[in-house]
Amino acid sequence: MKHARQRLGDAGEAAAAAFLEAAGYLIIARNHRCRRGEVDLIAEQGEILVFVEVRTRETAAFGGPEETVNFRKQQRVVAAAQDYLMRRRGPPRGARFDVIAVVSGQIAHYPNAFDAGRY
């Protein structure tokens, strides 16, 4: 049985995926996990692979969920993206890291929120 927090996160990821698909993205993977981290959504936008961290909160009373994607979380998303790219066979492609914040059903998309160059 899932806890309320996990159900909220699942709903936020589903809303983020629907948002991206409506904007023309193709979702190619969800919840890619490895020992060092996880990436919530992996999408294609044209020739670019987009690794998306989704953050969901019921309210923004204590700040926006995008503010919780700190340096450590970014490292874990980058590590999972690197794992995904190592396992995936195909031509080299450009990639970027986005954050999607979901609060009370409202979605804010932050393209290119951080990059892997710092890691």
Image (cartoon, helix red, strand yellow):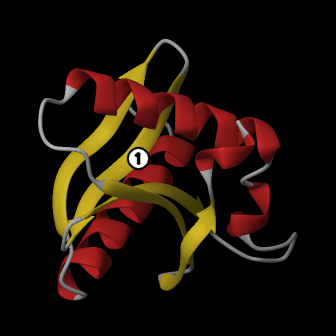
Q: Quadrant of residue 16?
A: bottom left
> What x and y, as percent, mark residue 111?
52, 76
Q: Is residue 64 visible?
A: yes
Give whichever of 92, 10 is nearer the camera. Answer: 92
Quadrant in which the N terminus appears:
top left
Q: Quadrant of residue 68?
A: bottom right
Q: Quadrant of residue 45?
A: bottom left
In the rendered structure, the answer to whether residue 15 lies left or right of residue 4 reads left
Residue furthest top in the image: 35
Q: Is residue 57 visible?
A: no
In the picture shown, does residue 15 fall above or below 42? below
Residue name at image x 56 percent, y 80 percent = 104
The amino acid pointed to by label 1 is: Asp
In the rendered structure, the answer to whether residue 65 lies left or right of residue 54 reads right
Residue at numbered disc 1? 40
> What x and y, as percent, mark residue 89?
13, 30
Residue name at image x 55 percent, y 17 percent = 36
